[in-house]
């Protein structure tokens, strides 16, 4: 079974060099994987392509060293060029995560192939309409949020007027019922959110700063995974 068929987005870390308080990204990834995180996304709006390729190499190495290359998915945010370059260099990258204004999903699928994972963050105000009207057969999961306003991604959830729209638990419950694909929710998620989030029946949570900026990333990651499993 391919990692696409076996995709687990229950505990999902998004991380880049601007999120780690100066610590190596690979250390944060290692801590998260040790704690039971099941999906890693490399995301940076400041890193050059060559740096993103190297971060992807380091992440793949950490996952392989833990013996979890077939269990923990490694994705890159937005940068199809980085995914393709990394693969050309022999780095195991499992797919890409894009937004509605990034490279179209069908182009990603054409270049990456059927075994690759493609995740999509739909803009908050359009998410329900997107699921109802757009062909989602090429998508493996939806990223939804924000659950709370977050400084990690200040523009997350902006509507057309510039107001941040956060997702209520009722809306997330509705979204999960409507969506033909798994849904992972993030945006300021903390451990006290996990029980209520699990009750919406979504498939997982994603975090950035909660783990990447924690004094003890592995401890916090482990607590999040434990809370999710307990609540589910």
Image (cartoon, grey):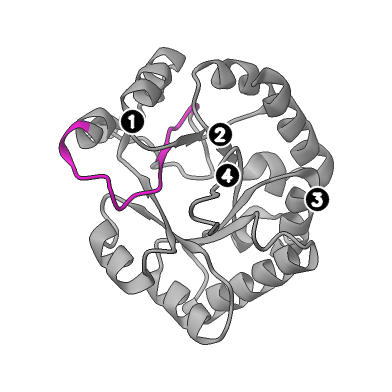
Instruction: Note whether 193 is above or below 53 in the view shown.
Output: above
Residue 179's tag is 1
Q: Secondary structure at mark 4?
A: loop
Q: Earlier in the sequence, mark 2 or mark 4?
A: 4
Badge 2: few (under 14), some or many (20 or more) residues near its Cα, within 10 Å?
many
Task: State the CA–CA distance, disc 3 to disc 4.
Answer: 15 Å
Task: Report the residue marked by disc 3.
Answer: 34
Distance of mark 1 from mark 3, alpha carbons? 31 Å
Please name which of the two marks, 1 or 3, marks the residue nearer to the observer.
1
Which quadrant of the view contains residue 159? Answer: top left
Disc 2 + disc 4, Cβ < 8 Å: yes
Q: Residues within 10 Å of mark 4 (few under 14, many from 20)?
A: some
Mark 1 to mark 4 CA distance (whole Å): 17 Å
Q: Which range is magenta? A: 132-148
Say if residue 173 shows up in the picture: yes
* Rendered location of residue 157, percent (x, y): 36, 35
Q: Secondary structure at mark 2?
A: strand
**137 horizontally vs 31: left or right:** left
Circle 2 residue: 204
Q: Is residue 132 shown left or right of residue 178?
A: left
* Residue depicted at 74% across the width and 55% down the height: 28
At horizontal 55% and vertical 49% (from top left) the residue drawn is 6
The residue that mark 4 highlights is 8
Residue 220 in the image, given as x and y percentages of width and height:
78, 37
Question: Outermost residue toward the left?
Answer: 133
Residue placed farthest to the top in the image?
Answer: 170
Which residue is rendered at x = 22% and y = 37% of the image?
130
Residues at discs 1 and 2 in contact (Cβ within 8 Å): no
Numbered disc 1: secondary structure:
loop
State which quadrant residue 223 falls in. Answer: top right
């Amino acid at each position: 079974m391919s990692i696409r068929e076996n995709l687990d987005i229950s505990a999902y870390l998004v991380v880049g060099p601007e999120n780690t308080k100066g610590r190596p990204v690979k250390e944060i990834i290692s801590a998260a994987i040790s704690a039971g995180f099941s999906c890693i996304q490399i995301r940076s709006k400041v890193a050059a392509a060559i740096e993103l390729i190297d971060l992807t190499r380091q992440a793949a190495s950490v996952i392989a060293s833990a013996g979890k290359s077939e269990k923990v998915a490694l994705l890159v945010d937005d940068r199809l060029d980085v995914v393709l370059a990394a693969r050309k260099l022999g780095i195991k990258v499992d797919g890409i995560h894009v937004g509605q204004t990034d490279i179209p999903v069908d182009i990603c699928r054409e270049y990456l192939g059927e075994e690759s994972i493609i995740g999509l963050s739909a803009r908050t105000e359009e998410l329900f309409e997107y699921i109802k009207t757009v062909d989602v057969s090429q998508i493996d999961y939806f990223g939804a949020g924000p659950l709370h306003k977050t400084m990690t991604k200040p523009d997350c959830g902006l509507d057309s007027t510039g107001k941040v729209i956060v997702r209520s638990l009722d809306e997330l419950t509705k979204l999960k019922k409507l969506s033909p694909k798994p849904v992972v929710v993030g945006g300021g998620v903390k451990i006290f959110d996990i029980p209520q989030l699990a009750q919406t029946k979504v498939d997982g949570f994603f975090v950035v700063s909660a783990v990447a900026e924690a004094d003890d990333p592995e401890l916090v990651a482990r607590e999040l995974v434990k809370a999710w499993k307990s609540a589910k």
